């Protein structure tokens, strides 16, 4: 395919077009998944609240996301008075770009990835740390006190949880000795318990797995950590001034980053595309992208489940959890892990 | 001109322009955002050199943490723009002299220092990943300087906490988390048994 493109378009242009096609191949299914995660969220929340949920548009409400999208597109975009116009429109773009750009290094199986970079983990953390700009700028640019408060809350929260997440990832890096996602997954396939779910990182790194899972919810500003859009206090938080398509972009970015965090948790701790069953089980025992998708979907269901289950955290409790609970846990486990790895009991030889 | 040099000139141009806008932008928030843009472009230039670790760390540390906190503070400050521009002409000569001195110093370093030539002729790191190589050098050859630097940072951290900690003041409010967590339903509400109240006939109309 790439040879064909380079034959017709020349070396550089062919390369660029090839990557453009690859980007479309990643982004289109992702957007569709986002659309159906929003629907799944409404239906599952409805089920958990003992009500029906969106079931009117199409069979079983399956066309609801497209009805929502059309509605967003045809709404008027309202710009608040004295808003900083450029920043106002920059914010949703930034948040969406960050949510999508991270997918550039996420592998879907050993042969199927957008790019295979050596510093994949570093890249994901770097781009992930940029996402907060979208929220803080959206909060500031709207020239509204409510959105500003939401932006400030989100910033403080994301900065706090980024640290714990970073340290949790450090454990994964120590164990696998690489910053490359494919190496990280492959390292989980080896060891004494190879070929089953027990050899994945989530068991030896269990505290870090928990910290990463919970911080992931906090990083995406989802319930119960959604103080930045706490509608009981600050209306709708950082996106209170947005309407129409810019608002839709915020929603798209929120769900895309939910999927991203689930995918990263899967790759780092749950063995990515590895099968939980031994190789002798035939097709069930083979590694495949289906396993990755199944694990991601289970984690996504968790996101929705938490939202239906837990009440929103108080702001000071969020800060305490991030700084005084998660950070010490990960720091201690890094030392434990270091000692474990050089001891004769090490399972990573 | 190949794609790499075109990209180099694009990134450099944006870097220089955004650097200029940092000091000329009227709104301090916009200035901070231009600084972010400058950092991102510098990171892109480093990435083109093959220094992926430095480049991503620049984004992670400076753009992702330092500038976010900076922006956080700048947004909350109620800056009087007129007062900021008041002393412009008075301070201009001194600022110009300082600027020229800094420029000369940098030129001397770039043009006269033999290290610059050595760096320019250095082999690009290609065989082993950049972060791997840096890790090896930092934790073997330069382990003492790294330890020293980390002790300095730790000192700064402790001092910052010590300076802002105000436990003795009565105005400071603290919550006993253990007490909050240990609470149970009985300390929150009590069940009271009472007879149903029957409204008297006189009130019903």
Image: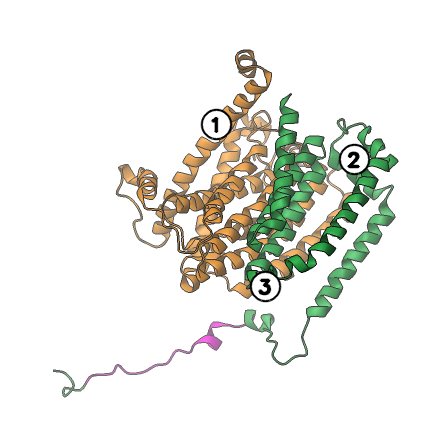
The dot on residue B133 is 2
The reply to whether dot 1 and dot 2 touch (C-beta < 8 Å) is no
In the rendered structure, the colour chosen for chain B is green
User: How far is the residue under mark 3 from the one under mark 1?
Assistant: 53 Å
Q: Main secondary structure of the magenta part?
A: loop
Residue A228 visible to the viewer? yes
What residue lies at 60% left-to-right and 73% top-to-bottom? B176
Mark 2 residue element = helix
Residue B196 on the magenta segment: yes
Circle 3 residue:
B83
Q: Chain of mark 1?
A: A
- Residue A172, given in percent of the width and then of the height, sits at 67, 42
Q: Is residue A50 left or right of residue A330?
A: left
Mark 3 residue element = helix
Which-is-in-front pick, marks 3 and 1?
Answer: 3
Q: Is residue A127 left or right of residue A170?
A: left
Q: Is residue B119 left or right of residue B8?
A: right
Q: Which residues are magenta?
A: B182-199
Mark 1 residue element = helix
Which chain, by letter, is orange?
A
Residue A114, compared with residue A215, is above or below; it is above
- Residue A240, given in percent of the width and then of the height, sits at 41, 55
Q: B131 or A50, which lies in front?
A: B131
Circle 1 residue:
A25
The reply to whether dot 3 and dot 1 touch (C-beta < 8 Å) is no
């Amino acid at each position: 395919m790439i040879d064909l493109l380079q034959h017709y378009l020349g070396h550089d242009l062919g390369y660029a077009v090839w990557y453009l096609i690859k980007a479309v191949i990643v982004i289109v299914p992702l957007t569709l998944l986002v659309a159906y995660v929003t629907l799944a969220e409404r239906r599952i929340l409805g089920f958990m609240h003992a009500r029906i949920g969106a079931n009117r548009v199409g069979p079983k409400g399956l066309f609801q996301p497209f009805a929502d999208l059309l509605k967003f597109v045809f709404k008027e975009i309202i710009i608040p008075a004295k808003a900083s116009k450029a920043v106002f429109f920059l914010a949703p773009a930034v948040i969406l770009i960050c949510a999508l750009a991270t997918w550039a290094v996420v592998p879907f199986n050993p042969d199927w990835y957008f790019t295979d970079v050596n510093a994949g983990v570093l890249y994901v953390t770097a781009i992930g740390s940029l996402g907060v700009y979208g929220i803080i700028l959206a909060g500031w640019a709207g020239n509204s006190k409510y959105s500003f408060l939401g932006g400030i809350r989100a910033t403080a929260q994301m900065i706090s949880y980024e640290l714990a997440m970073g340290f949790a990832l450090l454990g994964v890096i120590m164990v696998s000795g690489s910053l490359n996602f494919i190496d990280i997954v492959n390292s989980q396939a080896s060891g004494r318990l190879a070929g089953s779910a027990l050899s994945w990182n989530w068991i030896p790194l269990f505290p870090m797995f928990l910290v990463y899972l919970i911080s992931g919810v906090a990083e995406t500003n989802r319930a119960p950590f959604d103080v930045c859009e706490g509608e009981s206090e600050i209306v709708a938080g950082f996106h209170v001034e947005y309407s129409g398509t810019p608002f839709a972009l915020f929603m798209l970015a929120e769900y895309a980053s939910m999927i991203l965090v689930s995918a990263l948790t899967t790759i780092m701790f749950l063995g990515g595309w590895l099968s939980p069953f031994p190789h002798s089980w035939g097709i069930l025992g083979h590694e495949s992208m289906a396993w990755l998708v199944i694990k991601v979907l289970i984690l996504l269901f968790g996101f929705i489940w938490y939202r239906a289950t837990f009440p929103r955290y108080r702001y000071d409790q969020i800060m305490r959890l991030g700084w005084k609970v998660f950070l010490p846990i990960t720091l201690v486990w890094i030392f434990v892990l270091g000692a474990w790895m050089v001891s004769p009991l090490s399972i990573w030889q | 001109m190949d794609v790499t040099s075109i990209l180099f000139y694009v990134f450099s141009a944006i870097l220089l322009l955004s650097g200029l806008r940092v000091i000329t932008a009227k709104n301090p928030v916009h200035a901070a955002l231009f600084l972010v843009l400058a950092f991102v472009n510098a990171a892109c230039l480093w990435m083109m050199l093959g220094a992926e670790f430095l480049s991503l760390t620049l984004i992670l540390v400076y753009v992702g943490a330092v500038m976010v906190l900076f922006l956080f503070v700048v947004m909350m400050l109620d800056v009087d723009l007129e007062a900021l521009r008041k002393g412009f002409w008075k301070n201009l000569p001194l600022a110009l002299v300082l600027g020229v001195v800094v420029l000369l110093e940098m030129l001397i370093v770039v043009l006269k220092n033999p290290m610059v030539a050595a760096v320019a002729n250095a082999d690009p790191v290609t065989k082993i990943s950049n972060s791997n190589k840096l890790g090896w050098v930092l934790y073997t050859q330069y382990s003492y300087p790294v330890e020293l630097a980390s002790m300095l940072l730790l000192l700064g951290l402790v001092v910052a906490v010590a300076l802002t900690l105000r436990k003795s003041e009565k105005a400071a409010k603290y919550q006993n988390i253990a007490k909050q967590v240990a609470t149970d339903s009985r300390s929150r509400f009590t069940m009271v048994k009472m007879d149903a109240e029957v409204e008297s006939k006189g009130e019903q109309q």
